[in-house]
Image (spheres, rainbow, N blue to C red):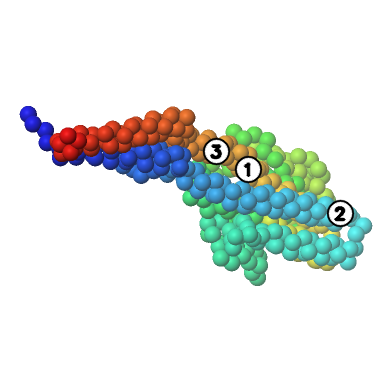
Amino acid sequence: MRISTAHTYQQAIESLQQRQTDLVQSQSQLTSGKKVNVPSDDPIAAAQAERALTSIGRADADTRALNASRNVMQIAESSMGDAVDLLQQARESFISAGNATYTDNERQSIAKKLQKIRTQLLSVANRPDGNGGFVFGGQGSATPPFVDAPGGVQFIGQGGELRAPASESMNLTVDGQNVWLKASQGNGVFVTAASPTNTGSSWITAGSVSDPRTNPYLTGTSSAPYAIAFQVSAGTTTYTINGGSPVPYKDGQAITVDGMTFTIKGVPANADQFTINPSQKNLSVFDALDSAIKTLNTTGLNNGQITQAVNKGISDMDSVLSTVQGGRSAVGESLNTMAGIENRISSSKLAAQTAQSNAEDLDMTSAISAFQAKQSGYQAALQSYSMVQKMSLFQYINAQ
């Protein structure tokens, strides 16, 4: 088979061009530090790097969400800490109002102090989160979520919690309705109360559950109220429970009925009445204070009425305190959980960065060696081509 001179030259030129292309690609890789600069360099590695880059972007988004959530939870934890301090001040002030030597004016002074505490608590409940929202705004609120209306403080936000758009569950708000307006009445199972028409000096304690197995409110067998009615006749005081048989009354003696134990103290008047009802989770921090303030501003109360009001107020304060502290504990747990979430995000991002590096980063030592080899090969090919150019028939004839 005859091979023309032109074909030989063409093969040599194509070889030089290919060597030059390889050399330029190698030089480009050295300059960028990456073995994959365009997908065509290595389609499989390019796809792996793209998936890793997507994972890195997701980790960065999760980190931003985590930082936003942590900021809100820190504000919420601090806010509820402020609320606990204020409620403890209110509780101590209300306890002092039970002093039998206090005058109506002195109790009204305490009521003014409680009013100031209430104002501060409302400000805490409407604390902003620094991003245009409110910490206790539930699922979002463009305006302060708690409004002081004529019937008491109302929640105008949407119940629930706003979640960050992230791989793991992170809150951007706290359900303020549950924290501020959903404490349990009484002792959490039942609530005792004195009739507002009572004229005697007796009062009833908050009571406790003595036998959960027979308590209708715990077993769910009944939600009916109980009425303890007093009769005073010929110097003898008796009481009935829901119209049952009369029982002699002894001041301070514990009374037990259907797994509930409570005590009535003082001197009841004829027709005085006390009630027991199932507890409801609708006690507001602000309603508890409003009730206390109203009582302290009422003049002419006897010692029994004052004691009853103070005991109810303390029971309410304890309940709302417990609810706020429970909310604070939940927020604290969320902050603790975020440390684990942060570690998982960091680990995920590091794994993705490693995968990206393995897919597209260049081994500089090997790349430099390969570049030098290609450079030497290209130079040798140039020299060979220059010699081949002189091996044509025309060159031979001219040389003769």
Q: Is residue 234 above or below residue 2?
A: below
Q: Nearer the viewer, residue 19 or 60?
A: 19
Give whichever of discs 1 and 3 has the lower sequence position. 1
Residue 234 appears anywhere in the view: no
Question: What amino acid type is highlighted by mark number 3?
Answer: Ser
**Residue under numbered circle 1:** 335
Residue positioned 78% across, 64% down in the render: 116
Q: Could you say which disc has been placed on residue 346 in the image?
A: 3
Residue situated furthest left in the rendering: 1
Regarding mark 3 in the picture, which secondary structure is present there? Answer: helix
Q: Position of residue 137 (x, y in %)?
A: 58, 58
- Contact between marks 1 and 3 (CB within 8 A): the answer is no
Side (left or right) of 42 relative to 131 = left
Q: Is residue 1 above or below residue 134?
A: above
Give whichever of discs 2 and 1 has the lower sequence position. 2
Residue positioned 33% across, 32% down in the render: 380
Q: Mark 3 or mark 2: which is in front?
A: 3
Q: Nearer the viewer, residue 56 or 144?
A: 56
Give whichever of discs 3 and 2 has the lower sequence position. 2
Question: What amino acid type is highlighted by mark number 1?
Answer: Leu
Q: Mark 1 or mark 3: which is in front?
A: 3
Q: Mark 2 or mark 1: which is in front?
A: 1
Side (left or right) of 249 relative to 138 = right
Q: Which corner quadrant holds the C terminus? A: top left
| Label 3, label 2: how far apart the Cα atoms are | 54 Å
Q: Would you call the spot at circle 2 few (<14 residues within 10 Å), some (14-19), or many (20 or more)?
A: some
Q: Nearer the viewer, residue 249 or 281?
A: 281
Side (left or right) of 250 relative to 223 = right
Residue positioned 65% across, 43% down in the render: 332
Q: Could you say which disc has been placed on residue 96 in the image?
A: 2
Q: Position of residue 131 (x, y in %)?
A: 60, 60
